Image (cartoon, rainbow, N blue to C red):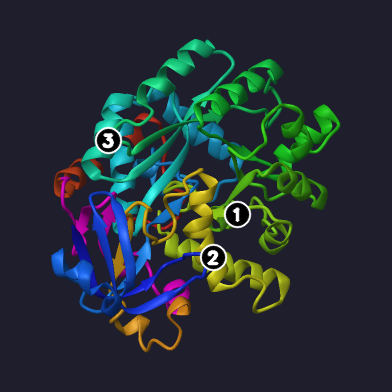
Amino acid sequence: MRAISNVTIVTMDPARRIITDGAIVFNGSELVAVDKSSALRDWLSTADITDGAGKVVLPGLIDTHAHADQSILRGLGDQMHWMPFLDDVIDPWLAERDPADAVLANALSMVEMLKNGTTCFVSPNVDPTDDFAALSDCVQSIGIRAVLGRFAMASEAMDDILAVTDRWQGAADGLVSMWFGLDVPRRPGDIDYPHFYEAVKKAADERGCGIVYHFCSEFEDAMYIVNRYGMRPAEWSRDNHALGGNVLLINGCQMTPDEIRILADTGTHLAHSPVANMKMATGILPVPDVLAAGVNVSLGTDGALNNNSYDMFAEMKTAVLLQNAVRHHARALTAEQVLEMATCHGARAIGRDDLGSLEPGKQADFILLDLERPNTLPMHDLISNLVFSANGSHVRDVFVAGRQVVRDRLLTGFDEAALLADINDKALRIADQLSLSTHSTWPIE
């Protein structure tokens, strides 16, 4: 039995309690008590106690849109809209890369995520050529939860797709969850496969896993669906068995009110990535309208190639500021709402009722932040400080399934220094191999 005491706990439980002078007690991977220290004397008398020294405890953040294989290309996708971005950067990277380089990129992303307080992420388009054994080993050694949306294309035999999904489901001591990253038509030349989509939905339902794909993200892909099929993207998805309670859509920037209602009626989830949407000029999700309609909206960073980081604190702040600016209303979206999106809404989006809040019986996934810093004092409003003042560097300690994976900003089970020593040389080689360069016009001497 272990305990963290002398902390302020933002529980994200149904009552949204904030507990001062609190303690959390966990046994193995499970939380067993979360309350005032004075109410947990009996638990604390038998626990191995760590003094939290006035830190703030949050549930681990859940990044529901994180292309973890792109960090090694950071800075090479700037000033691009989505089609040249896919054609000139993503497609060459997928076609030419060594699977070992993909694992290296995933490792860099996962280390960054953990140190920024993200304990679980969804990678929506994991390439079929990736080395899933090495990737799972990497997940386990780093200690983060990974939802891997293995790209599912109709050109591949369904039995082969299912074999990979079933083989790696629950790998890395349960840290790996296998989903289907659905390939759907988005631009001229794409082909639709109605029977394949139905087969994928059936397989996901039978396995209790999810489906994830980019949806109605840009004006061009939305209009492609309209022009080709004579219907809106949400109607196309509904008619092709690609909506439902185990489906996570990405972006949705171009949705109409009718489409928002379709998502609500089908219980479909939506991941919002405001930084990447703004950076690539793809559109703005009307978050208050989507939430008001009853759609579960989570939060995601997208990726280090078009964000260019995996800092969910930056994502929370940006989400609020974007909605407030475009709606000319200072409370269009609140700090409390985006913190929900980054925690309990994220857990709901991935079908995990054991994550996203700090309550007995849930998984011991939590982060400790040091807010005794110049940019997060004074503490008039804790939630305001967390969303508008804090960033990933305030995260000091991270626990996943009861295992401490970050201690005082250092990973406990992974050689971060060795990883960083490898990155620059390999990144330069990859950029040269793919003939990629930055768009900066300033001279470097």
Residue that label 3 marks: 173
Q: Tell me which numbered mark, 1 or 2, is placed earlier along the sequence.
A: 1
Furthest-right residue in this view = 230
Q: Residue 338 carries which label?
A: 2
Say if 331 sits above or below 222 in the image: below
- Is there a contact, CB below 8 Å, between mark 3 and mark 1? no
Which residue is rendered at x = 65% and y = 43% of the image?
268
Q: Does the magenta stretch include residue 397?
A: yes
**Magenta region:** 385-414
Q: Residue 297 carries which label?
A: 1
Can the viewer see residue 429 in this picture? no
Say if 186 sits above or below 324 in the image: above
Cα gap from disc 1 to disc 2, whole angstroms: 9 Å
Query: 81 or 146, which is in the foreground?
Result: 146
Quarter of the picture holding the N terminus: bottom left
SS at mark 2?
helix
Image position, residue 430 (x, y; %): 33, 33
Q: Tell me which numbered mark, 3 or 1, is placed earlier along the sequence.
A: 3
SS at mark 3?
loop
Instruction: Name the residue type under label 2.
Output: Val
Cα gap from disc 3 to disc 1, whole angstroms: 28 Å
Position of 409 compared to 199: left or right?
A: left
Instruction: Name the residue type under label 3.
Output: Asp
Image position, residue 415 (x, y; %): 15, 46
Q: Does the magenta stretch include residue 156?
A: no
Quarter of the picture holding the C terminus: bottom left
Position of 163 compared to 136: left or right?
A: right
Cα gap from disc 2 to disc 3, whole angstroms: 30 Å
